[in-house]
Amino acid sequence: MKTLFLAAVFGAATFAQEGPVPGNLANTEIHVLPAQGNVYMLVGAGGNIAVQVGHDGALIVDTQYAQLADKILAAIKKVSDRPLRYIVNTHYHADHIGGNEPLRKAGATIAGGNVAGDLGAAASEGAQIIAHDNVAKRMTAPTGQQAPTPTGAWPTDTFIDDEKKLWFNGEGIEIIHLPNAHTDGDSIVFFRRSDVIATGDLFTTTDYPVIDVAAGGTINGFINGVNRILDLVITVYGQEGGTMIIPGHGRLSDAGDLINYREMITIIRDRVQDMVKKGMTLEQVKAAKPTFDYDPLYGSNPRWTPDMFVEAVYKTLKK
Amino acid sequence: MLASAQVNLSGVWSSRLDEDFPDRLAGPELGDYGGLPINAADRLRATSWNASLITLPEYQCRVHPSDYAASFADIRMWEDRDRDTQELVAIHIHHFAWATERTIWMDGRPHPPDYALHTAMGFSTGKWDGDILTVTTTHLKEGWARRNGVARSDRATVTEHFIRHGDDLTWVIVVNDPVYFTEPLFRSRDYVFNATGQIAPYPCESVTEIIRPKGQIPHYLPNTNPFLKEYQVNHGIPEQAAMGGAETMYPEYKQKIATMPKPGGAK
Ligand SMILES: [Zn+2]
Protein backbone atom coordinates (compact mmCIF):
# COMPACT_ATOMS: atom_id res chain seq x y z
CA MET A 1 0.00 0.00 0.00
CA LYS A 2 1.24 3.43 -0.83
CA THR A 3 1.59 6.34 1.55
CA LEU A 4 -1.48 8.48 1.33
CA PHE A 5 -1.24 12.23 1.41
CA LEU A 6 -3.46 15.05 0.36
CA ALA A 7 -2.52 18.18 -1.54
CA ALA A 8 -5.76 19.93 -0.62
CA VAL A 9 -8.78 19.29 1.53
CA PHE A 10 -11.50 17.62 -0.51
CA GLY A 11 -14.87 17.98 1.12
CA ALA A 12 -16.73 16.42 -1.74
CA ALA A 13 -17.08 12.79 -0.69
CA THR A 14 -20.84 13.29 -0.60
CA PHE A 15 -20.84 14.37 -4.27
CA ALA A 16 -23.41 12.03 -5.74
CA GLN A 17 -25.30 13.78 -8.47
CA GLU A 18 -26.36 10.67 -10.33
CA GLY A 19 -29.24 8.34 -9.73
CA PRO A 20 -32.04 8.62 -7.20
CA VAL A 21 -31.64 10.64 -4.01
CA PRO A 22 -30.44 8.34 -1.19
CA GLY A 23 -33.24 8.88 1.30
CA ASN A 24 -34.55 6.11 3.49
CA LEU A 25 -33.00 2.94 2.14
CA ALA A 26 -34.99 0.60 4.39
CA ASN A 27 -37.26 -0.42 1.53
CA THR A 28 -34.55 -0.59 -1.12
CA GLU A 29 -34.24 -4.02 -2.70
CA ILE A 30 -31.08 -5.29 -4.32
CA HIS A 31 -31.90 -6.93 -7.65
CA VAL A 32 -29.57 -9.40 -9.34
CA LEU A 33 -29.40 -9.42 -13.13
CA PRO A 34 -27.06 -11.75 -15.04
CA ALA A 35 -24.85 -9.61 -17.26
CA GLN A 36 -22.79 -12.27 -19.07
CA GLY A 37 -20.44 -15.12 -18.22
CA ASN A 38 -19.41 -14.94 -14.58
CA VAL A 39 -20.58 -11.39 -14.09
CA TYR A 40 -23.84 -10.10 -12.60
CA MET A 41 -25.25 -6.62 -12.11
CA LEU A 42 -26.68 -5.62 -8.73
CA VAL A 43 -29.20 -2.81 -8.83
CA GLY A 44 -30.27 -1.03 -5.65
CA ALA A 45 -29.68 2.58 -4.68
CA GLY A 46 -26.57 4.45 -5.72
CA GLY A 47 -24.21 3.16 -8.36
CA ASN A 48 -24.74 -0.23 -9.96
CA ILE A 49 -22.51 -3.01 -8.60
CA ALA A 50 -20.81 -5.57 -10.82
CA VAL A 51 -20.17 -8.96 -9.21
CA GLN A 52 -17.78 -11.51 -10.69
CA VAL A 53 -17.93 -14.97 -9.14
CA GLY A 54 -16.15 -18.29 -9.41
CA HIS A 55 -14.00 -20.80 -7.56
CA ASP A 56 -11.69 -18.14 -6.07
CA GLY A 57 -14.51 -16.14 -4.51
CA ALA A 58 -16.35 -12.95 -5.38
CA LEU A 59 -15.08 -9.64 -6.70
CA ILE A 60 -17.33 -6.61 -6.69
CA VAL A 61 -17.07 -3.28 -8.41
CA ASP A 62 -18.38 -0.46 -6.16
CA THR A 63 -20.42 -0.79 -2.98
CA GLN A 64 -23.45 1.58 -3.06
CA TYR A 65 -24.29 2.63 0.54
CA ALA A 66 -23.27 1.25 3.95
CA GLN A 67 -26.93 0.87 4.99
CA LEU A 68 -27.38 -1.61 2.14
CA ALA A 69 -24.36 -3.78 2.97
CA ASP A 70 -26.36 -6.68 4.42
CA LYS A 71 -28.68 -6.73 1.44
CA ILE A 72 -25.75 -6.54 -0.96
CA LEU A 73 -24.10 -9.49 0.79
CA ALA A 74 -27.36 -11.44 0.59
CA ALA A 75 -27.55 -10.67 -3.13
CA ILE A 76 -23.96 -11.85 -3.68
CA LYS A 77 -24.86 -15.06 -1.79
CA LYS A 78 -27.52 -15.76 -4.41
CA VAL A 79 -24.80 -16.19 -7.03
CA SER A 80 -21.81 -17.35 -4.96
CA ASP A 81 -21.21 -19.18 -1.70
CA ARG A 82 -17.53 -18.26 -1.78
CA PRO A 83 -15.98 -15.34 0.20
CA LEU A 84 -15.85 -11.78 -1.06
CA ARG A 85 -12.19 -11.26 -1.93
CA TYR A 86 -11.91 -7.98 -3.82
CA ILE A 87 -13.71 -4.67 -3.96
CA VAL A 88 -12.80 -2.34 -6.82
CA ASN A 89 -13.84 1.31 -6.55
CA THR A 90 -14.43 3.08 -9.87
CA HIS A 91 -14.16 6.50 -8.16
CA TYR A 92 -14.58 8.21 -4.80
CA HIS A 93 -18.24 9.33 -4.87
CA ALA A 94 -20.32 8.38 -1.83
CA ASP A 95 -22.87 6.39 -3.83
CA HIS A 96 -20.10 4.07 -5.10
CA ILE A 97 -17.93 3.64 -1.98
CA GLY A 98 -20.49 3.96 0.83
CA GLY A 99 -20.53 0.22 1.55
CA ASN A 100 -16.75 -0.22 1.46
CA GLU A 101 -16.20 -0.63 5.19
CA PRO A 102 -18.91 -3.19 6.09
CA LEU A 103 -18.43 -5.16 2.85
CA ARG A 104 -14.69 -5.29 3.32
CA LYS A 105 -15.14 -6.59 6.86
CA ALA A 106 -17.48 -9.31 5.62
CA GLY A 107 -14.89 -10.50 3.10
CA ALA A 108 -11.57 -12.28 3.31
CA THR A 109 -8.30 -11.62 1.55
CA ILE A 110 -6.41 -14.35 -0.22
CA ALA A 111 -3.15 -14.21 1.75
CA GLY A 112 -0.32 -15.89 -0.06
CA GLY A 113 1.03 -16.26 -3.54
CA ASN A 114 1.97 -13.11 -5.35
CA VAL A 115 -0.28 -10.83 -3.32
CA ALA A 116 1.00 -11.68 0.17
CA GLY A 117 3.86 -9.24 -0.01
CA ASP A 118 1.51 -6.30 -0.56
CA LEU A 119 -0.75 -6.93 2.35
CA GLY A 120 0.98 -6.85 5.67
CA ALA A 121 -1.48 -6.27 8.51
CA ALA A 122 -4.34 -5.77 6.07
CA ALA A 123 -4.40 -9.49 5.31
CA SER A 124 -6.54 -10.29 8.31
CA GLU A 125 -8.95 -7.43 7.86
CA GLY A 126 -11.24 -8.66 5.13
CA ALA A 127 -11.46 -8.10 1.41
CA GLN A 128 -8.96 -5.97 -0.46
CA ILE A 129 -10.13 -2.60 -1.78
CA ILE A 130 -8.50 -1.69 -5.09
CA ALA A 131 -8.69 1.82 -6.51
CA HIS A 132 -6.67 4.36 -8.40
CA ASP A 133 -4.42 6.37 -6.11
CA ASN A 134 -6.47 9.54 -6.68
CA VAL A 135 -9.50 7.78 -5.16
CA ALA A 136 -7.50 7.08 -2.02
CA LYS A 137 -6.33 10.70 -1.88
CA ARG A 138 -9.91 11.93 -1.94
CA MET A 139 -11.10 9.50 0.72
CA THR A 140 -8.32 10.17 3.20
CA ALA A 141 -6.71 13.22 4.81
CA PRO A 142 -3.26 14.31 5.91
CA THR A 143 -2.28 13.55 9.50
CA GLY A 144 -4.17 15.74 11.93
CA GLN A 145 -7.05 16.48 9.58
CA GLN A 146 -10.50 14.96 9.49
CA ALA A 147 -10.80 12.45 6.64
CA PRO A 148 -14.04 12.49 4.65
CA THR A 149 -14.43 8.72 4.99
CA PRO A 150 -13.69 6.22 7.82
CA THR A 151 -10.31 4.46 7.68
CA GLY A 152 -11.96 1.08 7.22
CA ALA A 153 -13.40 2.26 3.91
CA TRP A 154 -10.07 3.29 2.43
CA PRO A 155 -8.48 1.50 -0.49
CA THR A 156 -5.91 -1.05 0.62
CA ASP A 157 -4.35 -1.56 -2.78
CA THR A 158 -3.87 1.47 -5.01
CA PHE A 159 -2.26 1.98 -8.40
CA ILE A 160 -0.81 5.13 -9.94
CA ASP A 161 -0.41 4.21 -13.59
CA ASP A 162 -2.82 3.51 -16.44
CA GLU A 163 -3.87 0.05 -15.50
CA LYS A 164 -3.88 -2.70 -12.92
CA LYS A 165 -4.24 -6.31 -14.04
CA LEU A 166 -5.60 -9.16 -12.00
CA TRP A 167 -6.25 -12.86 -12.67
CA PHE A 168 -9.24 -14.02 -10.64
CA ASN A 169 -11.81 -16.77 -11.09
CA GLY A 170 -10.12 -17.98 -14.24
CA GLU A 171 -10.26 -14.72 -16.10
CA GLY A 172 -8.08 -11.73 -16.73
CA ILE A 173 -9.44 -8.52 -15.28
CA GLU A 174 -8.22 -5.13 -16.44
CA ILE A 175 -8.76 -2.16 -14.15
CA ILE A 176 -8.16 0.72 -16.53
CA HIS A 177 -7.69 4.30 -15.33
CA LEU A 178 -9.27 6.95 -17.53
CA PRO A 179 -7.77 10.31 -16.61
CA ASN A 180 -9.72 13.48 -15.84
CA ALA A 181 -13.12 12.28 -16.96
CA HIS A 182 -15.88 12.05 -14.33
CA THR A 183 -13.20 12.72 -11.67
CA ASP A 184 -9.40 12.40 -11.66
CA GLY A 185 -9.53 8.86 -10.27
CA ASP A 186 -11.88 6.96 -12.57
CA SER A 187 -11.37 3.32 -13.42
CA ILE A 188 -13.37 0.98 -15.57
CA VAL A 189 -13.22 -2.76 -15.00
CA PHE A 190 -12.99 -5.07 -17.99
CA PHE A 191 -13.73 -8.76 -17.43
CA ARG A 192 -12.02 -10.25 -20.43
CA ARG A 193 -13.41 -13.79 -20.54
CA SER A 194 -16.94 -12.86 -19.48
CA ASP A 195 -16.70 -9.91 -21.90
CA VAL A 196 -18.30 -7.40 -19.56
CA ILE A 197 -17.19 -3.86 -18.76
CA ALA A 198 -18.23 -2.03 -15.58
CA THR A 199 -17.87 1.65 -16.46
CA GLY A 200 -18.52 3.48 -13.20
CA ASP A 201 -19.96 6.90 -13.92
CA LEU A 202 -18.20 7.21 -17.28
CA PHE A 203 -21.51 5.98 -18.64
CA THR A 204 -25.05 6.13 -17.29
CA THR A 205 -28.36 5.69 -19.11
CA THR A 206 -30.14 8.15 -16.83
CA ASP A 207 -28.27 11.46 -16.71
CA TYR A 208 -26.05 13.87 -18.55
CA PRO A 209 -22.40 13.05 -17.91
CA VAL A 210 -21.59 14.27 -14.42
CA ILE A 211 -18.31 16.15 -14.51
CA ASP A 212 -16.94 16.69 -11.01
CA VAL A 213 -14.81 19.69 -11.98
CA ALA A 214 -13.55 20.25 -8.42
CA ALA A 215 -12.24 16.68 -8.44
CA GLY A 216 -10.45 16.99 -11.77
CA GLY A 217 -13.22 15.94 -14.16
CA THR A 218 -13.25 17.44 -17.68
CA ILE A 219 -15.52 17.07 -20.71
CA ASN A 220 -12.71 16.10 -23.06
CA GLY A 221 -11.35 13.55 -20.62
CA PHE A 222 -14.87 12.18 -20.36
CA ILE A 223 -15.26 11.86 -24.13
CA ASN A 224 -11.81 10.27 -24.43
CA GLY A 225 -12.82 7.82 -21.72
CA VAL A 226 -16.02 6.85 -23.49
CA ASN A 227 -14.11 6.38 -26.76
CA ARG A 228 -11.62 4.18 -24.92
CA ILE A 229 -14.46 1.99 -23.66
CA LEU A 230 -15.84 1.75 -27.21
CA ASP A 231 -12.41 0.59 -28.38
CA LEU A 232 -12.73 -2.42 -26.07
CA VAL A 233 -16.21 -3.37 -27.24
CA ILE A 234 -16.86 -5.97 -29.94
CA THR A 235 -20.44 -6.48 -31.13
CA VAL A 236 -22.09 -9.50 -32.69
CA TYR A 237 -23.77 -7.53 -35.49
CA GLY A 238 -24.30 -3.83 -36.00
CA GLN A 239 -24.30 -2.15 -32.63
CA GLU A 240 -25.61 -5.04 -30.55
CA GLY A 241 -24.57 -8.02 -28.49
CA GLY A 242 -21.05 -9.17 -27.70
CA THR A 243 -19.50 -7.08 -24.95
CA MET A 244 -21.99 -6.20 -22.22
CA ILE A 245 -21.71 -2.93 -20.34
CA ILE A 246 -22.71 -2.28 -16.73
CA PRO A 247 -23.22 1.47 -16.41
CA GLY A 248 -22.69 3.49 -13.25
CA HIS A 249 -26.42 4.12 -13.11
CA GLY A 250 -29.32 2.85 -15.18
CA ARG A 251 -29.93 -0.28 -17.18
CA LEU A 252 -27.67 -3.05 -18.42
CA SER A 253 -26.33 -1.95 -21.80
CA ASP A 254 -24.26 -2.88 -24.80
CA ALA A 255 -22.38 -1.01 -27.50
CA GLY A 256 -25.48 0.60 -29.03
CA ASP A 257 -26.36 2.43 -25.83
CA LEU A 258 -22.82 3.66 -25.38
CA ILE A 259 -22.63 4.77 -29.04
CA ASN A 260 -25.79 6.87 -28.60
CA TYR A 261 -24.38 8.35 -25.39
CA ARG A 262 -21.06 9.15 -27.08
CA GLU A 263 -22.96 10.83 -29.91
CA MET A 264 -24.89 12.99 -27.43
CA ILE A 265 -21.88 14.10 -25.40
CA THR A 266 -19.77 14.81 -28.47
CA ILE A 267 -22.47 16.89 -30.16
CA ILE A 268 -23.08 18.96 -27.02
CA ARG A 269 -19.33 19.45 -26.50
CA ASP A 270 -18.97 20.61 -30.10
CA ARG A 271 -21.83 23.09 -29.70
CA VAL A 272 -20.41 24.58 -26.50
CA GLN A 273 -16.91 24.62 -28.02
CA ASP A 274 -18.24 26.63 -30.96
CA MET A 275 -19.86 29.11 -28.56
CA VAL A 276 -16.66 29.42 -26.54
CA LYS A 277 -14.80 30.15 -29.79
CA LYS A 278 -17.30 32.89 -30.56
CA GLY A 279 -16.51 34.48 -27.20
CA MET A 280 -19.90 33.84 -25.62
CA THR A 281 -20.20 34.14 -21.84
CA LEU A 282 -21.40 31.28 -19.68
CA GLU A 283 -24.77 32.98 -19.29
CA GLN A 284 -25.09 33.35 -23.06
CA VAL A 285 -24.18 29.71 -23.59
CA LYS A 286 -26.75 28.55 -21.04
CA ALA A 287 -29.38 30.79 -22.67
CA ALA A 288 -28.62 29.22 -26.07
CA LYS A 289 -29.64 25.82 -24.65
CA PRO A 290 -27.03 23.60 -26.31
CA THR A 291 -28.65 20.53 -24.68
CA PHE A 292 -32.22 21.35 -25.78
CA ASP A 293 -32.77 18.25 -27.93
CA TYR A 294 -31.52 15.86 -25.25
CA ASP A 295 -33.21 17.49 -22.24
CA PRO A 296 -36.34 15.30 -22.43
CA LEU A 297 -34.01 12.30 -22.10
CA TYR A 298 -31.45 13.42 -19.54
CA GLY A 299 -32.56 16.79 -18.19
CA SER A 300 -34.91 15.86 -15.35
CA ASN A 301 -32.38 15.23 -12.55
CA PRO A 302 -32.67 18.23 -10.19
CA ARG A 303 -29.19 17.50 -8.78
CA TRP A 304 -27.50 17.52 -12.17
CA THR A 305 -29.45 19.87 -14.36
CA PRO A 306 -28.73 20.76 -18.00
CA ASP A 307 -27.38 24.12 -16.77
CA MET A 308 -24.98 22.42 -14.35
CA PHE A 309 -23.78 20.11 -17.13
CA VAL A 310 -23.36 23.00 -19.57
CA GLU A 311 -21.45 24.97 -16.95
CA ALA A 312 -19.07 22.06 -16.34
CA VAL A 313 -18.51 21.63 -20.09
CA TYR A 314 -17.95 25.36 -20.56
CA LYS A 315 -15.55 25.70 -17.65
CA THR A 316 -13.41 22.74 -18.59
CA LEU A 317 -13.25 23.81 -22.24
CA LYS A 318 -12.22 27.32 -21.20
CA LYS A 319 -9.33 25.98 -19.10
CA MET B 1 -56.05 -24.64 -23.43
CA LEU B 2 -55.92 -23.67 -27.06
CA ALA B 3 -57.11 -20.16 -27.61
CA SER B 4 -59.86 -20.11 -30.19
CA ALA B 5 -60.11 -17.91 -33.25
CA GLN B 6 -56.39 -17.73 -33.88
CA VAL B 7 -55.11 -17.37 -37.40
CA ASN B 8 -51.91 -18.91 -38.60
CA LEU B 9 -49.36 -16.27 -39.60
CA SER B 10 -46.57 -18.70 -40.46
CA GLY B 11 -44.80 -18.48 -43.78
CA VAL B 12 -42.96 -16.02 -45.99
CA TRP B 13 -44.72 -12.73 -46.61
CA SER B 14 -43.68 -10.42 -49.43
CA SER B 15 -43.62 -6.72 -48.75
CA ARG B 16 -45.79 -4.45 -50.91
CA LEU B 17 -43.77 -1.28 -51.21
CA ASP B 18 -46.58 0.92 -52.48
CA GLU B 19 -47.42 2.71 -49.23
CA ASP B 20 -45.18 5.65 -48.18
CA PHE B 21 -42.85 4.69 -51.03
CA PRO B 22 -40.38 7.60 -50.74
CA ASP B 23 -39.89 6.72 -47.11
CA ARG B 24 -38.99 3.17 -48.03
CA LEU B 25 -36.83 1.95 -50.92
CA ALA B 26 -35.95 5.35 -52.32
CA GLY B 27 -35.25 6.77 -48.88
CA PRO B 28 -36.70 9.95 -47.43
CA GLU B 29 -35.36 13.31 -48.51
CA LEU B 30 -33.25 15.38 -46.15
CA GLY B 31 -35.35 17.83 -44.19
CA ASP B 32 -38.71 16.10 -44.78
CA TYR B 33 -40.27 15.62 -41.37
CA GLY B 34 -43.88 16.05 -42.52
CA GLY B 35 -46.43 13.62 -41.12
CA LEU B 36 -44.42 12.91 -37.99
CA PRO B 37 -45.77 13.93 -34.55
CA ILE B 38 -42.40 15.27 -33.35
CA ASN B 39 -41.74 17.94 -30.75
CA ALA B 40 -39.22 20.78 -30.95
CA ALA B 41 -36.50 18.73 -29.26
CA ASP B 42 -36.74 16.01 -31.91
CA ARG B 43 -36.75 18.65 -34.64
CA LEU B 44 -33.38 19.88 -33.36
CA ARG B 45 -32.07 16.29 -33.31
CA ALA B 46 -33.23 15.93 -36.91
CA THR B 47 -31.83 19.22 -38.24
CA SER B 48 -28.51 18.49 -36.50
CA TRP B 49 -28.26 15.09 -38.18
CA ASN B 50 -25.62 14.74 -40.86
CA ALA B 51 -25.97 11.78 -43.23
CA SER B 52 -22.20 11.24 -42.99
CA LEU B 53 -22.87 9.79 -39.56
CA ILE B 54 -23.74 6.47 -41.17
CA THR B 55 -20.30 6.26 -42.76
CA LEU B 56 -18.79 5.73 -39.30
CA PRO B 57 -17.91 2.04 -38.97
CA GLU B 58 -19.96 1.63 -35.79
CA TYR B 59 -23.07 2.93 -37.57
CA GLN B 60 -22.76 1.07 -40.87
CA CYS B 61 -24.47 -2.15 -39.82
CA ARG B 62 -26.90 -0.56 -37.37
CA VAL B 63 -30.15 -2.46 -37.90
CA HIS B 64 -33.59 -1.01 -38.41
CA PRO B 65 -35.46 -1.16 -35.11
CA SER B 66 -38.49 -3.44 -34.96
CA ASP B 67 -40.97 -0.57 -35.31
CA TYR B 68 -39.27 0.52 -38.56
CA ALA B 69 -38.21 -2.87 -39.95
CA ALA B 70 -41.61 -3.46 -41.52
CA SER B 71 -40.76 -0.79 -44.06
CA PHE B 72 -38.52 -3.10 -46.05
CA ALA B 73 -38.44 -6.37 -47.87
CA ASP B 74 -39.86 -9.77 -47.05
CA ILE B 75 -40.35 -11.46 -43.71
CA ARG B 76 -40.71 -15.01 -42.48
CA MET B 77 -43.00 -15.78 -39.55
CA TRP B 78 -43.06 -19.03 -37.63
CA GLU B 79 -44.45 -20.46 -34.43
CA ASP B 80 -43.03 -22.24 -31.38
CA ARG B 81 -45.57 -24.65 -29.95
CA ASP B 82 -45.30 -26.85 -26.90
CA ARG B 83 -44.95 -30.38 -28.27
CA ASP B 84 -47.33 -32.01 -25.81
CA THR B 85 -50.05 -29.41 -25.42
CA GLN B 86 -49.63 -27.69 -28.81
CA GLU B 87 -50.03 -24.40 -26.99
CA LEU B 88 -48.52 -21.40 -28.70
CA VAL B 89 -45.36 -20.30 -26.87
CA ALA B 90 -44.00 -17.70 -29.25
CA ILE B 91 -44.26 -16.25 -32.74
CA HIS B 92 -41.05 -15.25 -34.50
CA ILE B 93 -40.38 -12.81 -37.32
CA HIS B 94 -37.25 -12.82 -39.44
CA HIS B 95 -36.73 -9.68 -41.53
CA PHE B 96 -34.64 -9.92 -44.68
CA ALA B 97 -33.20 -6.46 -43.96
CA TRP B 98 -30.22 -6.83 -41.62
CA ALA B 99 -31.42 -10.38 -40.85
CA THR B 100 -33.01 -9.21 -37.62
CA GLU B 101 -35.21 -11.62 -35.71
CA ARG B 102 -37.93 -10.95 -33.21
CA THR B 103 -39.64 -13.12 -30.66
CA ILE B 104 -43.21 -12.34 -29.67
CA TRP B 105 -43.94 -14.24 -26.47
CA MET B 106 -47.45 -15.70 -26.38
CA ASP B 107 -47.15 -17.56 -23.06
CA GLY B 108 -48.18 -14.71 -20.79
CA ARG B 109 -44.73 -13.98 -19.41
CA PRO B 110 -44.14 -10.49 -17.97
CA HIS B 111 -41.91 -7.85 -19.53
CA PRO B 112 -38.43 -7.58 -17.95
CA PRO B 113 -37.62 -5.01 -15.24
CA ASP B 114 -36.59 -1.52 -16.23
CA TYR B 115 -32.90 -2.24 -15.58
CA ALA B 116 -32.76 -4.99 -18.22
CA LEU B 117 -31.11 -4.59 -21.62
CA HIS B 118 -32.83 -2.67 -24.40
CA THR B 119 -32.44 -3.97 -27.95
CA ALA B 120 -33.28 -2.87 -31.47
CA MET B 121 -36.07 -5.48 -31.56
CA GLY B 122 -37.27 -4.79 -28.01
CA PHE B 123 -39.15 -7.22 -25.82
CA SER B 124 -42.53 -8.25 -27.24
CA THR B 125 -45.57 -10.03 -25.90
CA GLY B 126 -48.70 -10.84 -27.90
CA LYS B 127 -52.34 -11.67 -27.45
CA TRP B 128 -55.23 -12.46 -29.75
CA ASP B 129 -58.00 -9.93 -30.19
CA GLY B 130 -60.29 -12.24 -32.15
CA ASP B 131 -58.35 -12.95 -35.33
CA ILE B 132 -55.98 -10.03 -34.81
CA LEU B 133 -52.62 -10.54 -33.18
CA THR B 134 -51.87 -7.54 -30.97
CA VAL B 135 -48.26 -7.11 -29.84
CA THR B 136 -46.83 -4.87 -27.13
CA THR B 137 -43.13 -4.00 -27.28
CA THR B 138 -40.95 -2.36 -24.63
CA HIS B 139 -37.17 -2.25 -23.98
CA LEU B 140 -36.32 -0.73 -27.35
CA LYS B 141 -33.02 0.89 -28.13
CA GLU B 142 -33.11 4.37 -29.54
CA GLY B 143 -34.20 4.22 -33.16
CA TRP B 144 -35.76 6.53 -35.70
CA ALA B 145 -39.16 7.70 -36.82
CA ARG B 146 -37.71 8.34 -40.27
CA ARG B 147 -34.26 7.47 -41.50
CA ASN B 148 -33.22 11.04 -42.17
CA GLY B 149 -32.29 11.80 -38.59
CA VAL B 150 -35.67 11.95 -36.83
CA ALA B 151 -35.05 10.15 -33.54
CA ARG B 152 -37.41 7.80 -31.72
CA SER B 153 -36.29 7.45 -28.11
CA ASP B 154 -35.44 4.34 -26.10
CA ARG B 155 -38.40 5.08 -23.84
CA ALA B 156 -40.92 4.50 -26.62
CA THR B 157 -43.39 1.64 -26.46
CA VAL B 158 -45.01 0.11 -29.52
CA THR B 159 -48.35 -1.56 -30.12
CA GLU B 160 -48.76 -3.61 -33.31
CA HIS B 161 -51.68 -5.35 -34.95
CA PHE B 162 -51.23 -8.19 -37.45
CA ILE B 163 -54.41 -8.58 -39.47
CA ARG B 164 -54.68 -11.47 -41.94
CA HIS B 165 -57.35 -11.67 -44.63
CA GLY B 166 -56.66 -14.74 -46.74
CA ASP B 167 -53.33 -14.16 -48.43
CA ASP B 168 -53.12 -10.50 -47.41
CA LEU B 169 -51.50 -9.32 -44.21
CA THR B 170 -51.84 -5.79 -42.86
CA TRP B 171 -49.36 -4.84 -40.18
CA VAL B 172 -50.28 -1.76 -38.16
CA ILE B 173 -47.60 -0.14 -36.00
CA VAL B 174 -48.40 2.45 -33.34
CA VAL B 175 -45.39 4.14 -31.73
CA ASN B 176 -45.75 6.04 -28.46
CA ASP B 177 -42.70 8.08 -27.57
CA PRO B 178 -43.06 10.18 -24.40
CA VAL B 179 -39.70 11.84 -25.14
CA TYR B 180 -39.98 12.98 -28.75
CA PHE B 181 -43.61 12.58 -29.94
CA THR B 182 -46.61 14.66 -28.92
CA GLU B 183 -49.05 12.05 -30.30
CA PRO B 184 -48.72 8.40 -31.31
CA LEU B 185 -47.27 7.71 -34.76
CA PHE B 186 -49.34 5.27 -36.84
CA ARG B 187 -47.93 3.27 -39.74
CA SER B 188 -49.38 0.45 -41.76
CA ARG B 189 -47.64 -1.94 -44.12
CA ASP B 190 -49.08 -4.51 -46.53
CA TYR B 191 -47.74 -7.98 -47.23
CA VAL B 192 -48.83 -10.82 -49.53
CA PHE B 193 -48.38 -14.51 -48.71
CA ASN B 194 -45.59 -16.02 -50.79
CA ALA B 195 -45.91 -19.80 -50.99
CA THR B 196 -42.50 -20.21 -52.66
CA GLY B 197 -40.76 -17.37 -50.83
CA GLN B 198 -37.14 -17.73 -49.74
CA ILE B 199 -35.18 -15.20 -47.74
CA ALA B 200 -31.55 -14.56 -48.56
CA PRO B 201 -28.88 -13.91 -45.92
CA TYR B 202 -27.94 -10.32 -45.11
CA PRO B 203 -24.30 -10.15 -44.10
CA CYS B 204 -22.92 -6.75 -43.11
CA GLU B 205 -19.32 -5.87 -42.40
CA SER B 206 -18.16 -2.47 -41.19
CA VAL B 207 -15.14 -0.88 -42.81
CA THR B 208 -13.38 2.44 -42.45
CA GLU B 209 -14.62 4.47 -45.41
CA ILE B 210 -13.20 7.83 -44.41
CA ILE B 211 -10.20 8.54 -42.17
CA ARG B 212 -11.33 10.89 -39.42
CA PRO B 213 -9.89 12.16 -36.15
CA LYS B 214 -10.74 9.69 -33.39
CA GLY B 215 -14.15 10.21 -31.88
CA GLN B 216 -15.36 12.73 -34.45
CA ILE B 217 -19.14 12.66 -34.94
CA PRO B 218 -20.52 14.29 -38.11
CA HIS B 219 -23.39 16.67 -37.25
CA TYR B 220 -24.56 20.20 -38.02
CA LEU B 221 -24.36 22.93 -35.42
CA PRO B 222 -27.79 24.52 -34.84
CA ASN B 223 -28.99 26.63 -37.80
CA THR B 224 -26.15 25.57 -40.09
CA ASN B 225 -27.65 22.56 -41.94
CA PRO B 226 -27.38 23.56 -45.62
CA PHE B 227 -29.77 20.87 -46.94
CA LEU B 228 -33.02 21.74 -45.21
CA LYS B 229 -34.32 24.01 -48.00
CA GLU B 230 -33.85 21.57 -50.89
CA TYR B 231 -36.89 19.48 -50.12
CA GLN B 232 -39.05 22.54 -49.52
CA VAL B 233 -38.02 24.25 -52.74
CA ASN B 234 -38.08 21.16 -54.97
CA HIS B 235 -41.59 20.20 -53.89
CA GLY B 236 -43.07 23.59 -53.03
CA ILE B 237 -43.61 22.59 -49.43
CA PRO B 238 -43.78 25.43 -46.89
CA GLU B 239 -41.09 25.24 -44.23
CA GLN B 240 -43.60 24.84 -41.42
CA ALA B 241 -45.06 21.75 -43.10
CA ALA B 242 -41.67 20.22 -43.88
CA MET B 243 -40.63 20.56 -40.26
CA GLY B 244 -43.40 18.19 -39.15
CA GLY B 245 -45.40 18.05 -35.97
CA ALA B 246 -48.61 16.24 -35.06
CA GLU B 247 -50.78 18.62 -37.09
CA THR B 248 -49.02 17.57 -40.29
CA MET B 249 -50.23 13.97 -39.90
CA TYR B 250 -53.86 14.77 -40.65
CA PRO B 251 -55.54 15.07 -44.08
CA GLU B 252 -57.08 18.46 -43.28
CA TYR B 253 -53.58 19.91 -43.01
CA LYS B 254 -53.52 19.97 -46.83
CA GLN B 255 -56.03 22.80 -46.76
CA LYS B 256 -53.81 24.74 -44.38
CA ILE B 257 -50.77 24.23 -46.62
CA ALA B 258 -52.71 25.73 -49.49
CA THR B 259 -52.99 29.00 -47.57
CA MET B 260 -49.28 29.19 -46.72
CA PRO B 261 -46.71 31.05 -48.80
CA LYS B 262 -44.59 28.76 -50.96
CA PRO B 263 -40.91 28.65 -50.11
CA GLY B 264 -38.73 31.14 -52.00
CA GLY B 265 -37.60 29.76 -55.36
CA ALA B 266 -40.22 27.00 -55.42
CA LYS B 267 -40.97 25.52 -58.80
ZN1 LIG C 1 -19.98 9.47 -9.48
Image (cartoon, coloured by chain):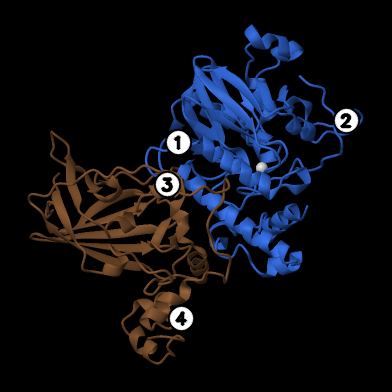
Q: Is residue A261 left or right of residue A312?
A: left
| Residue annotated with mark 2 | A142
**What's the amino acid at mark 1?**
Ile
Disc 2 to disc 1, C-alpha distance = 43 Å
- Do marks 3 and 2 share a chain? no
Q: Is residue A238 above or below residue A287?
A: above
| Residue annotated with mark 3 | B118
User: How many residues crowd mark 3 within 10 Å: few (<14), some (14–19), many (20+)?
Assistant: many
Helix, strand or loop at mark 4 = helix
The quarter holding residue A248 reads top right
Q: Nearer the viewer, mark 2 or mark 1?
A: 1
Q: Residue furthest right?
A: A144
Tell me the blue chain. A
Instruction: Tell me the number on the disc at residue B239.
Output: 4
User: How many residues crowd mark 4 within 10 Å: few (<14), some (14–19), many (20+)?
Assistant: many
Q: Nearer the viewer, residue B204 or A315?
A: B204
Colour chain B appears in: brown
